[in-house]
Amino acid sequence: MQLIDGKATSAEIKADIAARVARIIAEGGRAPHLAAILVGHDGGSETYVANKVKACEACGFRSTVIRREADVTQAELLSLIDTLNADTDVDGFIVQLPLPAHIDEQAVIEAVRPDKDVDGFHPVNVGRQALGLPCFHSATPAGIVELLRHYDIPTRGRSCVIIGRSNIVGKPLAALMMQRGVDATVTVCHSATEGLADITRRADILVAALGRPGFVTADMVKPGATVIDVGTTRVPDASRKSGFRLCGDVDFEAVAPKCSYITPVPGGVGPMTIVSLMQNTLRAALHEVY
Ligand code: GUN
């Protein structure tokens, strides 16, 4: 069993990006600039945005965090998005999700100009990705495909089973894995799937992205499979200073001995998601997509 080290892989990619940015600046260009809108004080969102700011520093990007309280109105948020859409100083921006219940998340996603949508959440980017056209790829799926490539894990003709059909992971990952050049045979499972374990046991690449800690058990995994764990649930843990630990969707201790490759949580998919955002931001700054 080999551990897939997302932290080390993402560090290598960030170093490559930083070298490219240094060249851009040496040639008289300017650093890419990512802005993030953070609404309220959700602990997970605070951590993600802080990590994105740190990644920007590592890549030589400028970053700006714009905070609004949880009682911000939808109109105020949409107006802020319009301002960033028009701000030529900002190459790309994200609205950290989830948003408070009174805000229509889809309306917010659709307000972001597709050519600044470095999260790849806008329907234009999702649709272009499904068609295999140039676009901003959604960050987590792109990070997973990059990890598979980095570790030379074969995908062509292999069975890829995805548990979870969210708009930000399951659905876009299915589209990427079946794309020409990746060429996996994709199955997407969800809460209504019957005979789940029979399906997951056929997977050469099993992706758990449902958000239920320890859901994937050893009996659900084919010997020699590659297991990708997208789960990041905060589980109370009194022995930690923070009071919680991050828990993946895979029962790691039981599953790892059966796998040829497996991602840990933390340190697997998470850092790769952030590095994909950095790659999208660089491409936005260089106008490589739009
Ligand atoms: N919430 C969970 N994951 C993400 C992400 O990749 N981007 C944004 N904006 N919010 C998220």
Image (tube, rainbow, N blue to C red):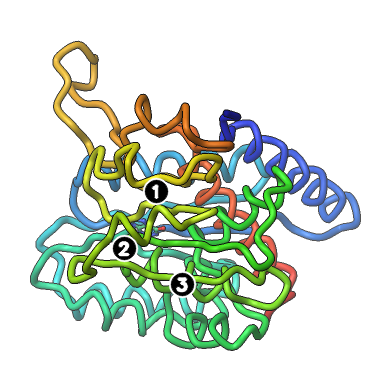
Inter-mark Cα distance, 3 to 2? 11 Å
Q: Between residues 232 and 59, which one lies in front from this camera angle?
A: 232
Look at mark 3 in the image and give the residue it sits on: 172
Find residue 156 and report its horizontal and vertical position in percent.
Answer: 69, 65
Find residue 250 and report its horizontal and vertical position in percent.
Answer: 33, 39
Element type at mark 3? helix
From this viewpoint, which residue is outermost toward the right? 27
Q: Between residues 143 and 4, which one lies in front from this camera angle?
A: 4
For label 3, the crowd category at 10 Å Cα-Cα, with few meaning under 14, some 14 to 19 and many 20 or more, is many
Q: Quadrant of ligand 1?
A: bottom left
Look at mark 1 in the image and give the residue it sits on: 230
Q: Establish if 113 lies above or below 252.
A: below
For badge 1, the amino acid type reads Val
**Left or right, residue 248 beside residue 185:** left
For label 2, the crowd category at 10 Å Cα-Cα, with few meaning under 14, some 14 to 19 and many 20 or more, is some
Label disc, if present, on residue 194 of the rendered structure: none
For badge 3, the amino acid type reads Pro
For badge 2, the amino acid type reads Gly
Look at mark 2 in the image and give the residue it sits on: 164
Which residue is pictured at 56% across the width and 54% down the height? 143
Inter-mark Cα distance, 1 to 2? 10 Å
Q: Which picture quadrant has residue 76?
A: bottom left
Asked whether the beta carbons under mark 1 and mark 2 sit within 8 Å of each other, the answer is: yes
Q: Establish if 56 lies above or below 247.
A: below
